[in-house]
Image (cartoon, rainbow, N blue to C red):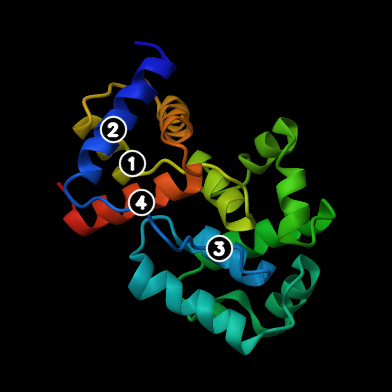
Amino acid sequence: MDIEEKGARVAEYVRGLRLTGFEYASVIDGEYHHMGATLTDAILQSGLNYKSTVEPRVRAIRENYPDATTTSAFRDLLSSVGAKQLLRWKNDEKPNRLAELTQFLCDEGVETEEGLCVWLDSKENADRLLKLRGIGPKTLHYLGILAGRDDVAVDVHVMRFLREAGVVFANVEEARDIVCCAADKLGVRRTVLDHSIWLRMSQKGPR
Protein backbone atom coordinates (compact mmCIF):
# COMPACT_ATOMS: atom_id res chain seq x y z
CA MET A 1 0.00 0.00 0.00
CA ASP A 2 1.14 3.55 -0.66
CA ILE A 3 0.73 6.51 1.70
CA GLU A 4 -2.72 7.36 0.35
CA GLU A 5 -4.00 3.82 0.93
CA LYS A 6 -2.48 3.61 4.39
CA GLY A 7 -3.88 7.03 5.28
CA ALA A 8 -7.31 5.90 4.09
CA ARG A 9 -7.09 2.80 6.29
CA VAL A 10 -6.21 4.87 9.35
CA ALA A 11 -9.03 7.30 8.58
CA GLU A 12 -11.49 4.40 8.35
CA TYR A 13 -10.18 3.01 11.64
CA VAL A 14 -10.72 6.38 13.32
CA ARG A 15 -14.26 6.59 11.94
CA GLY A 16 -14.97 3.23 13.50
CA LEU A 17 -13.55 4.34 16.84
CA ARG A 18 -15.68 7.47 16.69
CA LEU A 19 -18.75 5.22 16.89
CA THR A 20 -17.51 3.79 20.18
CA GLY A 21 -16.50 7.00 21.96
CA PHE A 22 -13.22 8.17 20.41
CA GLU A 23 -13.28 11.97 20.58
CA TYR A 24 -11.15 14.60 18.90
CA ALA A 25 -9.07 16.70 21.28
CA SER A 26 -10.58 20.10 21.95
CA VAL A 27 -7.41 21.64 23.41
CA ILE A 28 -3.94 21.40 21.89
CA ASP A 29 -0.79 22.10 23.89
CA GLY A 30 1.30 25.03 22.79
CA GLU A 31 0.77 28.38 21.11
CA TYR A 32 1.85 29.90 24.42
CA HIS A 33 3.04 33.15 22.83
CA HIS A 34 5.97 32.73 25.20
CA MET A 35 9.18 31.34 23.73
CA GLY A 36 10.48 30.34 27.14
CA ALA A 37 7.49 28.08 27.65
CA THR A 38 7.60 26.77 24.08
CA LEU A 39 11.27 25.81 24.19
CA THR A 40 11.00 24.33 27.68
CA ASP A 41 8.04 22.17 26.64
CA ALA A 42 9.86 20.95 23.51
CA ILE A 43 13.03 19.99 25.35
CA LEU A 44 11.46 18.39 28.42
CA GLN A 45 8.71 16.30 26.80
CA SER A 46 10.84 13.42 25.55
CA GLY A 47 10.78 10.42 27.86
CA LEU A 48 8.93 12.14 30.70
CA ASN A 49 5.42 12.12 32.12
CA TYR A 50 3.88 15.23 30.63
CA LYS A 51 1.23 15.96 33.25
CA SER A 52 3.37 15.46 36.33
CA THR A 53 6.77 16.68 35.13
CA VAL A 54 6.57 18.85 32.03
CA GLU A 55 3.32 20.77 32.33
CA PRO A 56 3.97 22.19 35.83
CA ARG A 57 7.37 23.52 34.79
CA VAL A 58 6.05 25.08 31.61
CA ARG A 59 3.24 26.73 33.56
CA ALA A 60 5.66 28.01 36.21
CA ILE A 61 7.87 29.66 33.59
CA ARG A 62 4.89 31.39 31.99
CA GLU A 63 3.53 32.59 35.33
CA ASN A 64 6.80 33.51 37.06
CA TYR A 65 8.56 35.05 34.07
CA PRO A 66 5.87 36.68 31.91
CA ASP A 67 8.43 38.88 30.16
CA ALA A 68 10.49 35.97 28.76
CA THR A 69 8.31 35.88 25.67
CA THR A 70 11.09 36.26 23.10
CA THR A 71 14.01 33.92 22.57
CA SER A 72 16.61 36.51 23.52
CA ALA A 73 14.70 37.46 26.69
CA PHE A 74 14.56 33.78 27.65
CA ARG A 75 18.29 33.38 26.91
CA ASP A 76 19.00 36.26 29.28
CA LEU A 77 16.79 34.63 31.90
CA LEU A 78 18.66 31.34 31.55
CA SER A 79 21.93 33.21 31.91
CA SER A 80 20.88 35.09 35.05
CA VAL A 81 18.95 32.34 36.86
CA GLY A 82 20.61 29.22 35.49
CA ALA A 83 18.83 26.56 33.47
CA LYS A 84 18.98 23.90 36.22
CA GLN A 85 17.50 26.23 38.81
CA LEU A 86 14.87 27.51 36.40
CA LEU A 87 13.73 23.98 35.56
CA ARG A 88 14.22 22.68 39.09
CA TRP A 89 16.33 19.89 37.58
CA LYS A 90 18.99 17.69 39.18
CA ASN A 91 21.20 16.66 36.26
CA ASP A 92 22.71 18.71 33.46
CA GLU A 93 21.45 17.07 30.28
CA LYS A 94 18.03 18.66 29.71
CA PRO A 95 19.04 22.12 31.02
CA ASN A 96 22.06 22.09 28.71
CA ARG A 97 19.89 21.09 25.75
CA LEU A 98 17.49 23.92 26.54
CA ALA A 99 20.31 26.48 26.75
CA GLU A 100 21.85 25.22 23.49
CA LEU A 101 18.54 25.33 21.58
CA THR A 102 17.77 28.81 22.91
CA GLN A 103 21.17 30.17 21.89
CA PHE A 104 20.94 28.50 18.48
CA LEU A 105 17.61 30.16 17.71
CA CYS A 106 18.90 33.50 18.98
CA ASP A 107 21.81 33.21 16.57
CA GLU A 108 19.29 32.48 13.80
CA GLY A 109 17.28 35.59 14.67
CA VAL A 110 14.21 33.54 15.64
CA GLU A 111 12.50 35.53 18.40
CA THR A 112 8.84 34.45 18.41
CA GLU A 113 6.63 31.44 17.69
CA GLU A 114 5.46 33.12 14.50
CA GLY A 115 9.06 33.60 13.42
CA LEU A 116 9.83 29.99 14.31
CA CYS A 117 6.98 28.76 12.10
CA VAL A 118 8.39 30.68 9.14
CA TRP A 119 11.95 29.57 9.89
CA LEU A 120 10.88 25.91 9.98
CA ASP A 121 9.43 26.21 6.47
CA SER A 122 13.00 25.78 5.25
CA LYS A 123 14.15 22.15 5.11
CA GLU A 124 17.72 23.39 5.42
CA ASN A 125 16.87 25.07 8.72
CA ALA A 126 15.08 21.96 9.98
CA ASP A 127 18.04 19.78 9.03
CA ARG A 128 20.43 22.04 10.94
CA LEU A 129 18.16 21.95 13.98
CA LEU A 130 18.29 18.14 13.88
CA LYS A 131 22.05 18.32 14.38
CA LEU A 132 21.61 19.75 17.87
CA ARG A 133 22.03 17.34 20.76
CA GLY A 134 18.67 15.89 21.83
CA ILE A 135 16.72 17.14 18.80
CA GLY A 136 15.29 14.24 16.79
CA PRO A 137 12.41 14.14 14.31
CA LYS A 138 9.77 13.88 17.04
CA THR A 139 11.09 16.92 18.93
CA LEU A 140 11.51 18.86 15.69
CA HIS A 141 7.88 18.35 14.67
CA TYR A 142 6.61 18.82 18.23
CA LEU A 143 8.43 22.16 18.45
CA GLY A 144 6.64 23.19 15.26
CA ILE A 145 3.29 22.17 16.71
CA LEU A 146 3.95 24.20 19.86
CA ALA A 147 4.72 27.19 17.67
CA GLY A 148 1.44 26.81 15.78
CA ARG A 149 2.29 24.61 12.79
CA ASP A 150 -0.28 22.03 11.71
CA ASP A 151 1.82 18.90 11.99
CA VAL A 152 2.23 15.44 13.52
CA ALA A 153 4.96 14.47 16.00
CA VAL A 154 5.33 10.70 15.89
CA ASP A 155 6.07 8.97 19.19
CA VAL A 156 5.53 5.47 20.59
CA HIS A 157 1.81 6.19 21.06
CA VAL A 158 1.27 7.15 17.42
CA MET A 159 3.25 4.15 16.20
CA ARG A 160 1.25 1.79 18.41
CA PHE A 161 -1.99 3.33 17.13
CA LEU A 162 -0.95 2.74 13.53
CA ARG A 163 -0.17 -0.90 14.32
CA GLU A 164 -3.57 -1.29 15.95
CA ALA A 165 -5.09 0.09 12.74
CA GLY A 166 -3.28 -2.64 10.82
CA VAL A 167 -0.89 -0.28 9.05
CA VAL A 168 2.76 -1.11 8.46
CA PHE A 169 5.29 1.73 8.14
CA ALA A 170 8.98 1.72 7.38
CA ASN A 171 10.12 4.59 9.59
CA VAL A 172 9.05 7.61 11.64
CA GLU A 173 8.74 9.90 8.64
CA GLU A 174 6.45 7.46 6.83
CA ALA A 175 4.34 7.14 9.97
CA ARG A 176 4.04 10.94 10.08
CA ASP A 177 3.01 11.08 6.41
CA ILE A 178 0.34 8.43 7.03
CA VAL A 179 -1.21 10.29 9.98
CA CYS A 180 -1.10 13.58 8.07
CA CYS A 181 -2.87 11.91 5.16
CA ALA A 182 -5.48 10.38 7.48
CA ALA A 183 -6.20 13.75 9.09
CA ASP A 184 -6.67 15.34 5.68
CA LYS A 185 -9.11 12.60 4.69
CA LEU A 186 -11.02 13.03 7.97
CA GLY A 187 -11.20 16.78 7.49
CA VAL A 188 -9.53 17.61 10.81
CA ARG A 189 -6.34 19.48 11.63
CA ARG A 190 -3.30 17.27 11.74
CA THR A 191 -2.43 18.50 15.21
CA VAL A 192 -5.92 17.57 16.40
CA LEU A 193 -5.64 13.99 15.17
CA ASP A 194 -2.10 13.71 16.52
CA HIS A 195 -3.12 14.89 19.99
CA SER A 196 -6.31 12.82 19.96
CA ILE A 197 -4.24 9.70 19.28
CA TRP A 198 -1.79 10.66 22.01
CA LEU A 199 -4.58 11.11 24.53
CA ARG A 200 -6.17 7.77 23.67
CA MET A 201 -2.98 5.74 23.70
CA SER A 202 -1.37 7.39 26.73
CA GLN A 203 -4.48 6.65 28.77
CA LYS A 204 -4.28 2.99 27.76
CA GLY A 205 -0.78 2.79 29.18
CA PRO A 206 2.35 1.04 27.86
CA ARG A 207 2.36 -2.40 26.28
Label 4 or label 1, whichever comes before in sequence order: 1
Q: Amino acid at mark 1?
A: Val
The kind of secondary structure element at disc 2 is helix
Q: Farthest top residue?
A: 1
Residue 162 marker? 2
For disc 2, the neighbor class at 10 Å (few under 14, some 14 to 19, many from 20) is: many
Q: Amino acid at mark 4?
A: Ser
For disc 4, the neighbor class at 10 Å (few under 14, some 14 to 19, many from 20) is: many
User: Mark 4 or mark 2: which is in front?
Assistant: 4
For disc 1, the neighbor class at 10 Å (few under 14, some 14 to 19, many from 20) is: many
Quarter of image, res 141: top right
Residue labelled with disc 3: 30
Q: Amino acid at mark 3?
A: Gly
Residue 158 marker? 1
Q: Nearer the viewer, residue 89 or 178?
A: 178
**Where residue 161 sits: x, y (%)?**
26, 38
User: Mark 4 or mark 1: which is in front?
Assistant: 4
Q: Is residue 84 above or below residue 102?
A: below
**Where residue 97 sits: x, y (%)?**
58, 59
Residue 8 marker? none
> Is 34 on the left-hand or right-hand side of 133?
right
Q: Farthest front residue?
A: 19
Residue labelled with disc 4: 196
